[in-house]
Image (tube, coloured by chain):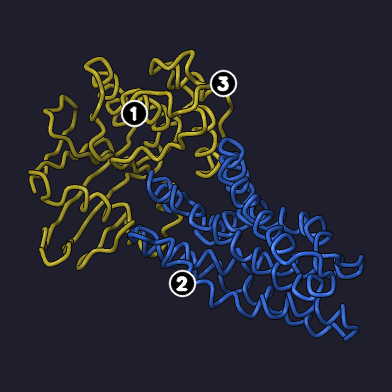
Chain colours: A blue, B yellow
């Protein structure tokens, strides 16, 4: 267990030493989401309608921006080998890295979303639902992304390949995440959306750390 | 200096063995049917031309890559059966330094100690760094250090890791004459404590209990 916290602490410390990389992803989220109200103009009804989709797509893309960092730097300087040789299960270490990635790239999106949502004239209950869906959905994005990041280690042009691999897998999260906010705004029941998002999260948590750990081991072999 | 690093000799004798190892890289058979046996207090010097498979052999011995044929044994057990127990005893230093550039030497060592389950106080890490001439540089980010100084940080890691088997890939690279001497001393101390060392180097080594393997 202490290994999990060590690796989270290490990754967060590394991020703090090089803040620009993280801030780029966050800034990207803010800018992309803000371009839509500016481009579309003051049609409040239309903005409210597209808000969930736009915010979720922006969240997907900005998560993707930070993904290559999850293993690539450690792979290049040999630290990933050292992690593999540490007397710790690789699954724990990979899980720690996924959690660190979520804290850095997912959690800020959850916190920023209401601020961006105001530009789309979302009401309080929609903002609240948006935050909740992001809270359930962004960990799934980090988990799924870790598989792509691990599989494309050492591949030239890996980040483009990773986007192609991972974006299709993000579709269910996008559908249920954005769908919940939309359903809430038109007064439909949203418990189904949340159940499915929760199920995705549980499934991803149960399987993906093992898949990513296996992929990392293959990459350093 | 060495008082807080326990000796391994009280445990039963440690043996690293490889039986019938074969390694294929791409289309090329690097070596096949390689046997080796190394006991406590011995150092194995792997020699050979560039590209002959020295690094591949070391990686097979660590378990990072799987052999095409044959097996590696630590004691009586194949290293594949309980990799975590084997990794507890193992320190591998590859040709990449694996130090995080944005962290200081001290932070790097403490981080690795935590991951390696080694209980280590700041003072012990600092004294290890000072021993290798890094006094005053322990809090600098590693990217401010020269290549040789980075290798010195790794020497401090070797001292603090408390592993019985050291597998070192070209440990003498980038070191000045003085540091080469210090590293030989460090390896000798490790051997005297009953540790095992496997290393590759293109230099002539003056170490006790040296076995040579020509690939």
Q: Identify the residue position indicated by label 2 in the image.
A: A164
Where residue B166 appears, x then y in whole percent?
A: 32, 40
Q: Nearer the viewer, residue B209 or A181?
A: A181
Instruction: Name which residue lies at 80% across and 85% down.
Output: A192
Instruction: Name which residue lies at 40% across and 42% down.
Output: B11
Q: Nearer the viewer, residue B121 or B129?
A: B129
Q: Disc 2 and disc 1: Cα gap in Å?
A: 39 Å
On the picture, is A110 further left or further right than A69? right
Q: Identify the residue position indicated by label 3 in the image.
A: B123
Image vertical order of residue A184 relative to residue B210, above or below? below
Q: Which of B61 and A40 is in front in this view?
A: A40
Rate crowding at label 2 as few (under 14), some (14 to 19) or many (20 or more) other CA atoms within 10 Å: few
**In terms of secondary structure, where does tag 1 sit?**
helix
Image vertical order of residue A25 relative to residue A157, above or below? above
Q: How many labels does the image show?
A: 3
Q: In which quarter of the image is residue A33?
A: bottom right
Instruction: Name which residue lies at 39% across and 32% down.
Output: B158
**In terms of secondary structure, where does tag 2 sit?**
helix
Where residue A108 appears, x then y in whole percent?
A: 72, 53
Q: Identify the residue position indicated by label 1 in the image.
A: B151
Q: Disc 1 and disc 3: Cα gap in Å?
A: 20 Å
Residue at mark 2 shares a chain with residue at mark 3: no
- Between circles 2 and 1, the one closer to the viewer is 2
Label drawn at residue B201: none
On the picture, is A128 further left or further right than B193? right
On the picture, is A105 further left or further right than A70? right
- Between circles 1 and 3, the one closer to the viewer is 1
Q: Please give the chain letter of the residue carrying mark 2.
A: A
Q: Please give the chain letter of the residue carrying mark 1.
A: B
Q: Please give the chain letter of the residue carrying mark 3.
A: B
């Amino acid at each position: 267990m202490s290994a999990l916290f060590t690796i989270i602490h290490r990754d967060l410390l590394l991020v703090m030493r090089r803040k620009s990389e993280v801030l780029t992803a966050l800034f990207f989220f803010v800018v992309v989401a803000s371009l839509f109200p500016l481009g579309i103009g003051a049609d409040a009804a239309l903005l409210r309608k597209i808000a969930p989709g736009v915010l979720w797509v922006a969240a997907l893309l900005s998560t993707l921006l930070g993904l290559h960092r999850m293993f690539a730097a450690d792979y290049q300087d040999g630290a990933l080998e050292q992690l593999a040789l540490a007397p710790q299960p690789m699954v724990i270490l990979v899980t720690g890295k996924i959690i660190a990635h979520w804290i850095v790239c997912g959690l800020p999106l959850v916190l920023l979303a209401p601020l961006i949502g105001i530009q789309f004239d979302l009401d309080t209950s929609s903002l609240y639902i948006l935050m909740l869906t992001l809270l359930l959905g962004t960990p799934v994005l980090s988990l799924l992304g870790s598989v792509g990041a691990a599989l494309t280690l050492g591949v030239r042009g890996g980040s483009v390949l990773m986007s192609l691999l991972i974006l299709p897998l993000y579709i269910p999260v996008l559908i249920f995440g954005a769908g919940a906010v939309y359903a809430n705004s038109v007064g439909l029941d949203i418990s189904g959306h949340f159940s499915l998002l929760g199920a995705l999260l549980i499934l991803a948590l149960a399987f993906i750390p093992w898949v990513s750990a296996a992929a990392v081991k293959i990459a350093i072999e | 200096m060495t008082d807080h690093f326990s000796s391994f000799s009280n445990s039963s004798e440690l043996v690293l063995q490889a039986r019938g190892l074969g390694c294929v890289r791409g289309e090329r058979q690097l070596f096949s049917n390689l046997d080796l046996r190394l006991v406590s207090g011995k150092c194995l010097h792997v020699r050979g031309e560039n590209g002959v498979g020295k690094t591949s052999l070391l990686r097979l011995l660590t378990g990072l890559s799987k052999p095409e044929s044959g097996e590696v044994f630590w004691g009586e057990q194949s290293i594949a059966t309980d990799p975590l127990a084997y990794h507890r005893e193992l320190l591998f230093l590859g040709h990449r330094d694996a130090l995080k550039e944005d962290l200081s030497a001290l932070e790097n060592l403490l981080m690795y100690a935590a991951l390696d389950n080694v209980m280590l106080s700041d003072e012990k890490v600092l004294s290890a760094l000072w021993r290798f001439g890094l006094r005053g540089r322990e809090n600098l980010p590693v990217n401010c250090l020269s290549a040789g100084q980075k290798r010195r940080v790794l020497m401090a890691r070797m001292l603090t890791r408390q592993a019985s088997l050291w597998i070192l890939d070209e440990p003498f690279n980038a070191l000045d004459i003085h540091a080469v001497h210090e590293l030989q001393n460090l390896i000798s101390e490790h051997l005297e404590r009953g540790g095992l060392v496997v290393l590759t180097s293109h230099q002539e080594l003056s170490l006790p209990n040296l076995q040579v393997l020509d690939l």
